Image (tube, rainbow, N blue to C red):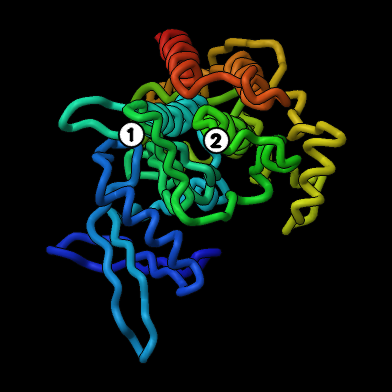
Amino acid sequence: KGRYGEVWRGQWQGENVAVKIFSSRDEKSWFRETEIYNTVLLRHENILSFVASDMTSRNSSTQLWLITHYHENGSLYDYLQRVAVETSEGLAMAAAVACGLVHLHTEIFGTEGKPAIAHRDLKSKNILVTKELRCCIADLGLAVTHSQTGNLLDVGNNPKWGTKRYMAPEVLDESIQTDCFDAYKRVDIWAFGLVLWEIARRTYSNGERRPVGPLDAAPGLRSRLSFGGLGIVEEYRPPFYDQVPNDPSFEDMRKVVCVEQQRPFVPNRWFSDPVRARLRLTRFQRLLDLTVICSPQTLSALVKLMKECWYQNPSARLTALRIKKTLDKIHGSVEKSKE
């Protein structure tokens, strides 16, 4: 259950699907998401795949259904509460979200083209985790589209903004240029920086493990090492958890983000000096050779990236494409360090 209704698992043609049932008061969100999926070519691995939508009657009430692919890992919000991730996994998740955002923000011309789209409600609850541990962006109920042909900006008929906790300063102080499409993209970038912070909190540093060799001979060893002092990771917390209440008001967020210009807390471990070490476990020496890669330099690079998403001045924030390229570069350096 969520703000817009319920999500059920169903079956269609032998495959699991997710059925999102909107409450009648959120008909505008259902209509907008259906409209975008039906009129825009959105086939992309990092955008939730659409199956169908329907308006049906159950128990003398109207139900609004949106049917999409099903991802059993649930939302990124749910996943990060259950699981801490290695550097390469965290980077891949962040890069997937950035890749999906690039696709949304980019206008594609031609017969198979699409307008540029700004999400307007990007958050970890609106990002799903696939079985390959990649991410795809969901929930386009507040999306805005823009086409350069005729300079057409379509904000839909839903006056709502996104989730208060993820609102950018210019939304909170009501200074946003609502007739400028780039302004909506910059709101997405602010929110992406917060999602990146959520992923970073749940990413190991100071002793991340990389197994080399057969693990099957040492059952359970991998999970014990995950929590056995070889890696440091924080508990999951939402952005601004220590600065606003659990359900912050618009005014709570405006005070913290606009007046006090606070940003989410960055732990010291994200800035620690990089170290590489090689560990041999005597008992399993013939079975397992474990390389311990301390990767705080990766987290410090992510800190720099997220802070460039959090500028008070919207026009100073990075673009989605620049974020994607930076994440690809960081990921490349991590993979190279494993060689």
Locate residue 11: give its quadrant: bottom left
Camera-nearest residue between 19 and 171: 171
Quadrant assignment for the C terminus: top left
Q: Residue at x 77, y 24 (%)?
A: 268
| Residue occupied by mark 1 | 115
Q: Secondary structure at mark 1?
A: loop
Locate residue 300: give its quadrant: top right
Check disc 1 and give the amino acid type: Pro
Check disc 2 and give the amino acid type: Asp
Disc 2 packing (10 Å; few <14; some 14–19; many ≥20): few
Camera-nearest residue between 200 and 241: 241
Residue 296: where, in percent of width, then height? 63, 18
Would residue 225 be visible to someone looking at this image?
no
Q: In the image, is residue 299 above or below residue 198?
A: above
Give the number of the disc on residue 179.
2
Q: In the image, is residue 149 above or below residue 219?
A: above
Residue 74: where, in percent of width, then height? 43, 54
Camera-nearest residue between 116 and 274: 116
